Image: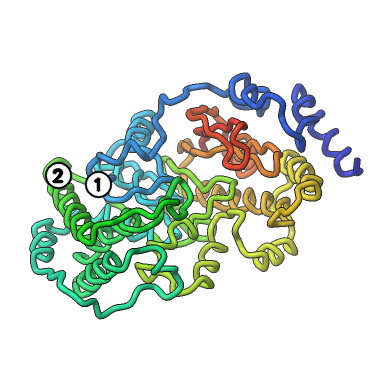
């Protein structure tokens, strides 16, 4: 055992007494992973941990039938019910300001707007940002959208080409592809960007169900090629436009005085949020520390919306986001030369435990996992710092995140995030475990999804 590992064990034993037995097991297979969910053997002394499985209803699937939220199927979001309950719990009302630094498809911003609460949404992904922007644009008269749809003609042949860097011929049957190109051509012909954005959302929504792909949760090909009717793209497109028109009528009639919403297509690690000391609450969910690749998983929509024109542009976007394990090695090498941002024992211990596992695992696709882990928490530190600067004293945070298993090393992402939040200056409140998950690599290992509560 190295001097570093000895030192880390001493630090863990000194600062986190009672967890020594658990830390001895890090780096090897846990014999009974369920105990780490139900008995809470791994704790951070300053916070309580409550088990409330399913009570909050975090899963975005609950949004599939809800007005406004149903426009897109963004699997990584949380539910309208969770946001509404958190708004109530934080006693937010008109005149307050809520922030989501990982806004995604806009669940927090839409919920706040419906309740007359002002909000800020930050989303780095350009294609997901399109969805967010459309969902909070309620000033557009839905009659104009319907009128523009009736003017569209869907006879061919199409005069535009599919994205050159996607495997289009494998992804779509020929007649289906032709229909999709015709629909895109009609959408592009709309001159008014305020009107066009709603048709872009409708167009994006038809791509996956008309393809030979599935997203469950990562994108991949369907084993047995399915037969798709050439008319399906037009049917789904018309259906989605109808939903959008119906939902815009709904909110314009139901919400007497909607909240304002300022949204930004920028990097939340670097963006100066403004409104210093004015944000009353943050409700958000960052990317998790795992192999989920947001860019790769949504490259179908990114490519067809012309938000990237090559795999190189996809890589550049991925490298700017909060880290996943598919980032470029060049970016990680550059990061590894920079001074450490955080000095936290738990991170040191986890990264030390991962190193020997890389040598034991044959055919491992990366050799820089310790650096990846450290960068993830550095990224989170930067976002939390920006949040802290923007919040008023006493402002509250609900932060949804899952723990991780990397190379059979358990990483309590939720508890380490609480330690990082304390380093920024936040007061820790509690951890609420809401959902059970299974590791994508080792299905027998039970992971948790938690809501972290802290305040300024």
The local secondary structure at tag 2 comes to helix
Residue 229 drawn at (x, y percent) = 24, 57
- In the image, residue 367 lies at what x, y percent? 74, 56
Does residue 25 sit above or below 314 in this rendering? above
Q: Name the residue under label 1.
A: 68
Give the Cα distance between marks 2 and 1: 9 Å
Which residue is nearer to you in this view: 280 or 124?
124
Residue 196, picture quadrant: bottom left
Q: Where is residue 316 in the image (x, y as percent from the top left)?
A: 54, 68
Residue shown at 41% from the left, 65% from the top: 170
Res 250 label: 2
Quadrant where the N terminus is found in the figure:
top right
Residue lying at 71% horizontally and 26% vertically, measured from the top left: 31
Q: Considering depth in this image, is 16 or 314 the residue closer to the camera?
A: 314
The crowding category of the residue bearing disc 2, from other C-alpha atoms within 10 Å (few below 14, some 14 to 19, many at least 20), is: few
Q: Is residue 257 above or below residue 124?
A: above
Q: Can residue 190 be seen in this view?
A: yes
Q: What element carries label 1?
A: loop
Front position in the image: 95 or 122: 122
| Residue 453 at least partly seen | no
Is 416 left, or right, of 122 in this rendering?
right
Mark 2–mark 1 contact, CB under 8 Å? yes
Residue lying furthest bottom = 159
| Mark 2 or mark 1: whose residue is earlier in sequence | 1
- Give the x, y percent position of residue 320: 54, 63
Is 271 located above or below residue 450 in the figure? Answer: below
């Amino acid at each position: 055992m190295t001097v570093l590992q000895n030192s880390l064990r001493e630090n863990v034993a000194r600062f986190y007494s009672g967890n020594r037995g658990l830390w001895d097991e890090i780096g090897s297979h846990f014999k009974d992973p369920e105990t780490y969910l139900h008995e809470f053997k791994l704790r951070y002394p300053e916070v309580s941990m409550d088990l409330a499985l399913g009570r909050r209803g975090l899963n975005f699937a609950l949004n599939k039938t809800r007005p406004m939220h149903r426009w897109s199927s963004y699997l990584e979001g949380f539910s309208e019910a969770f946001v509404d309950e958190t708004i109530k719990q934080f006693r937010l009302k008109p005149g307050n300001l809520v922030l989501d630094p990982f806004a995604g498809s806009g669940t927090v911003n839409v919920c706040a707007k419906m309740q007359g609460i002002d909000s800020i949404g930050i989303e780095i992904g350009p294609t997901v940002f399109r969805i967010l922007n459309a969902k909070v644009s309620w000033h557009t008269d839905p009659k104009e959208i319907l009128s523009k749809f009736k003017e569209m003609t869907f006879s061919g042949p199409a005069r535009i080409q599919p994205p050159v860097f996607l495997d289009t011929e494998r992804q779509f049957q020929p007649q289906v592809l032709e229909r999709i190109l015709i629909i895109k051509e009609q959408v592009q012909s709309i001159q008014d960007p305020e009107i066009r954005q709603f048709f872009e959302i409708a167009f994006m929504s038809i791509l996956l169900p008309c393809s030979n792909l599935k997203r469950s949760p990562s994108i991949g090909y369907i084993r047995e090629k399915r037969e798709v009717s050439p008319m399906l793209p037009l049917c789904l497109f018309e259906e989605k436009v109808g939903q959008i028109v119906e939902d815009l009528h709904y909110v314009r009639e139901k919400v007497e005085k909607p909240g304002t919403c300022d949204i930004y297509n920028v990097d939340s690690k670097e963006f100066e949020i403004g409104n210093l000391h004015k944000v009353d609450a943050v409700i958000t969910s960052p990317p998790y520390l795992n192999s989920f690749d947001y860019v790769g998983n949504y490259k179908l929509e990114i490519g067809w919306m012309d938000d990237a024109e090559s795999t190189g542009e996809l890589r550049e976007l991925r490298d700017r986001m909060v880290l996943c394990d598919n980032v470029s090695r060049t970016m990680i090498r550059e990061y590894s030369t920079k001074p450490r941002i955080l000095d936290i024992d738990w991170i040191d211990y986890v990264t030390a435990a991962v190193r020997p596992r890389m040598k034991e695992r044959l055919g491992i696709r990366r050799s820089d996992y310790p650096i990846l882990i450290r960068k993830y928490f550095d990224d989170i530190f930067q976002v939390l710092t920006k949040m802290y600067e923007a919040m008023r004293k006493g402002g509250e945070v609900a932060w949804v995140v899952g723990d991780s298993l990397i190379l059979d090393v358990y990483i309590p992402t939720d508890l380490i995030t609480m330690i990082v939040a304390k380093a920024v200056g936040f007061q820790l409140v509690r951890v609420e475990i809401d959902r059970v998950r299974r590791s994508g690599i080792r299905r027998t290992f039970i992971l948790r999804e938690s809501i972290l509560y802290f305040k300024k």
